[in-house]
Image (spheres, helix red, strand yellow):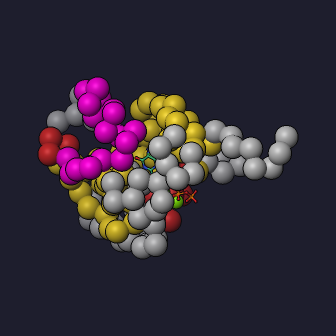
């Protein structure tokens, strides 16, 4: 198999929930530049989904998360991009370990900044896969969740 041959990759992203809001950042990359996306990244060899989600969250925002749970998985092919890619993405949800902690933009070359957005009033444009989930009526909050 040729080295350049594209293969699907595994993404792990996190709905970090705070009250009725979620943490989103505007992407600063070739893939979907300027769209609002969840914190997350690539699963590394040997990691659990939860370990990956917590590590990416820490690297990108400085935040420590707790009560990490699997929510759903998507299979998304990005054919329209300059460099076509294919992601199996694991969506987790989590809460702040310390509710007083604030996000920092620790990878400014990849993100324009993090902020909390009300689930009923999400910013536009959302990152493609996230937009599709929202359109389909998906909701990341636990069923018995009351703010
Ligand atoms: P890394 O080098 O830190 O491991 O990767 P990264 O630079 O943080 O990767 P990423 O693009 O943030 O996330 C990996 C892939 O996950 C992304 O290219 C496509 C997929 N993905 C989705 N939905 C979302 C989402 O809402 N946010 C993020 N960040 N990635 C997502 O399918
Ligand atoms: Mg990352
Ligand atoms: Mg990332």
The residue lying at 52 percent from left, 53 percent from top is 82
- Write down the region rendered in magenta: 122-138
Is residue 21 depicted above or below 57 in this figure? above
Q: Position of residue 48 (x, y in %)?
A: 61, 43
Please say whether residue 69 is visible from this viewpoint.
no
- As displayed, is residue 129 above or below residue 52? above
Residue 85 appears in which quarter of the rendering?
A: top right
Residue 93 painted magenta: no
Write the residue at 68% across / 40% down. Answer: 7
Residues 112 and 30: in front is: 30
| Quarter of image, res 9 | top right
Image position of 60 with respect to 119: above or below? below
Question: Could you say where residue 146 lies in the image, as x and y percent from the top left?
Answer: 17, 36
Where is residue 110 shown, x and y percent of the image? 45, 66
- With 144 as the anchor, is 61 left or right in this view? right
Question: Which is more toward the observer, 108 or 145?
Answer: 108
């Amino acid at each position: 198999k040729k080295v350049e041959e594209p293969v699907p990759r595994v993404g792990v992203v996190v709905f970090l929930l705070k009250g009725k809001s979620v943490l989103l950042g505007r992407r600063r990359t070739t893939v979907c530049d300027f769209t609002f996306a969840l914190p997350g990244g690539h699963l590394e060899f040997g990691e659990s989904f939860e370990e990956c989600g917590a590590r990416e969250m820490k690297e990108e925002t400085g935040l420590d998360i707790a009560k990490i749970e699997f929510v759903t998985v998507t299979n998304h092919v990005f054919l329209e991009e300059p460099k076509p890619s294919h992601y199996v993405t694991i969506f987790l949800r989590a809460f702040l370990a310390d509710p007083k902690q604030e996000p920092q933009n620790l990878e400014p070359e990849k993100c324009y900044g993090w902020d909390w957005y009300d689930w009923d009033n999400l910013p536009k444009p959302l990152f493609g896969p996230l937009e599709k989930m929202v359109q389909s009526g998906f909701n990341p909050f636990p069923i018995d969740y009351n703010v």
